[in-house]
């Protein structure tokens, strides 16, 4: 549910191509609980100005079905918890959390799908090759306390490393933790990859 995280998706993909680098995802739950948002004209106007800026800075495409479909659907609710559950489930059953994240982002920002709905997430999981019944069983198991604990731990990590928001990239070598300046690498995936490979 974070436009800047979608903007950083090419950097995440480049990081996946660095030999010896293990990537851990930490969902911050930006739109969970009382921060869930019902789509409205005000929300659309707010996010669209940021999304246009993100597109210009990162080269990431936002689809017409998102801008003129989802963001006009005032019955839709933006909620980070179900997509986070789906990513955690995909990681737990098949080590495919990164693939699920990428598919969810495309479904939301390009196709304008309601990615907070379990049926949509189940379809996306099947699209990336996860066995539907196994996925949904793990997804249901993660509902509530397990995902809320993951979000709380992610927020604690963000505070510990001095992160200010989403996305925050941190590189850990042994016990050394270094927060990376992602913003200067938007649209420069190869330079980012070179940095991570050093």
Image (cartoon, rainbow, N blue to C red):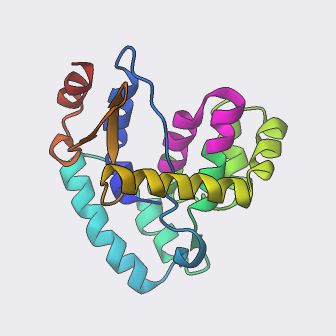
Instruction: Say which residue appears at 68% left-offset and 34% top-offset.
Output: 92
* In the depicted structure, whether residue 173 falls above or below residue 140: above
User: Which residue is situated farthest in the top direction here?
Assistant: 19
Task: Measuring from the top left, give residue 79's x and y in whole percent.
Answer: 58, 67
Q: Is residue 62 visible?
A: no
Instruction: Say which residue appears at 57% left-offset and 39% top-offset.
Output: 100
Instruction: Say which residue appears at 60% left-offset and 31% top-offset.
Output: 96
Left or right side of 19 for 179: left
Instruction: Say which residue appears at 31% left-offset and 63% top-offset.
Output: 51
Task: Measuring from the top left, give residue 198's x and y in whole percent.
Answer: 21, 19
Prevalent SS, magenta region:
helix
* In the depicted structure, whether residue 128 falls above or below residue 160: above
Task: Measuring from the top left, give residue 130's x and y in whole percent.
Answer: 71, 32
Q: Which residues are magenta?
A: 88-105
For the residue pair 9 and 109, the one nearer the viewer reads as 9
* In the depicted structure, whether residue 159 falls above or below residue 88: below
Q: Is residue 51 magenta?
A: no
For the residue pair 22 and 68, the one nearer the viewer reads as 22
For the residue pair 1 and 67, the one nearer the viewer reads as 1
What count of labels does the image hold?
0
């Amino acid at each position: 549910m974070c436009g800047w995280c979608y903007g950083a998706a090419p950097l995440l993909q480049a990081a996946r191509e660095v030999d010896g680098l293990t990537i851990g995802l930490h969902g911050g739950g930006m739109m969970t609980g009382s921060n869930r948002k019902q789509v409205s004209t005000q929300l659309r106007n707010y996010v669209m100005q940021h999304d246009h800026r993100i597109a210009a800075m990162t080269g990431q495409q936002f689809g017409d079905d998102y801008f003129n479909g989802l963001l006009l659907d005032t019955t839709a609710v933006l909620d980070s918890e179900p997509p986070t559950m789906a990513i955690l489930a995909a990681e737990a059953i098949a080590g495919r959390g990164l693939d699920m994240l990428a598919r969810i982002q495309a479904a939301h920002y390009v196709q304008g799908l309601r990615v907070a709905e379990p049926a949509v997430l189940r379809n996306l999981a099947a699209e990336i090759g996860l066995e539907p019944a196994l996925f949904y069983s793990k997804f249901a198991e993660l509902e509530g306390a397990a995902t809320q604990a993951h979000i709380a731990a992610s927020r604690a990590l963000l505070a510990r490393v001095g992160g200010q928001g989403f996305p925050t990239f941190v590189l850990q070598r042994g016990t050394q933790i270094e927060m990376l300046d992602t913003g200067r690498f938007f649209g420069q995936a190869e330079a980012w990859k070179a940095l991570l490979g050093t």
